[in-house]
Amino acid sequence: MPHHKQISLLLTKAAQDEYVLDKLMDDTQAPVEIFGFHAQQAAEKLLKAILAASGTTYPHTHRLVELIDLARSQGINLPDEFEELRYLTPFAVEFRYDVLPDEIEAPIDKSKVLELINNLRSWAESFIKERMGQEE
């Protein structure tokens, strides 16, 4: 898949997860696993878009720690606030399949998570725009 198309696809797919987050934000009945899953998915796709824009081949993984560490190893200066995204990784698989809702030890702060995802989106778009401008 061409470079620009892959980045666009990742950003579009992340926006779909962000849409779900917005819809679930004030829904007190929404399971935390569903909110956490879409937050993890949005973060994963945004991080992969950043990596793709830097010309870095990224692994097929849901582990946000691996993507954040890879970005940093490639000289991408991700703001420190995005370190907190690492804790969404269990929502990708473990909390969806292997853990009952009452077994999740620390419920997430939905507003803080949504703010982090929004900040990551803004940072990613700025980074990608800058990188794509350098290619022209």
Image: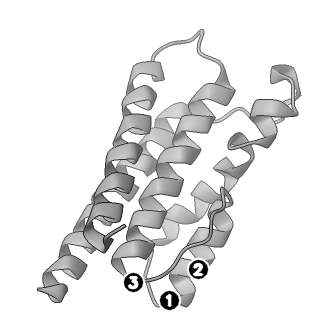
Which mark, residue 55?
Answer: 3
Q: Which residue is disc 1 drawn over?
A: 74
**Residue 134 found in image quarter:** bottom left
Front disc: 3 or 2: 3
Which mark, residue 70?
Answer: 2
Kindly indicate whether the residue at mark 2 contacts the one at mark 3 (C-beta within 8 angstroms): no
> Looking at the picture, how far across and down is residue 86, in whole percent?
65, 59
Foreground of the two, 42 or 30: 42
> Looking at the picture, how far across and down is residue 37, in whole percent?
61, 37
Front disc: 3 or 1: 3
| Point 65% across, 19% down: residue | 31
| Point 66% across, 67% down: residue | 65
Quadrant location, the C terminus: bottom left
Marks 2 and 1 sit apart, C-alpha to C-alpha, by: 6 Å
Foreground of the two, 35 or 45: 45
Q: Check the image and tell me how it is coloured.
A: one colour
Query: Along the horizontal axis of the image, is 33 left or right of 3?
Result: right
| Point 78% across, 35% down: residue | 95
**Residue 49 found in image quarter:** bottom left
Marks 3 and 1 sit apart, C-alpha to C-alpha, by: 9 Å
Kindly indicate whether the residue at mark 1 contacts the one at mark 2 (C-beta within 8 angstroms): yes
> Looking at the picture, how far across and down is residue 104, in whole percent?
82, 32
Q: Secondary structure at mark 2?
A: helix
Which residue type does callout 2 highlight? Answer: Leu
Is disc 3 surrounded by few (<14), some (14 to 19) or many (20+) residues within 10 Å?
Answer: few
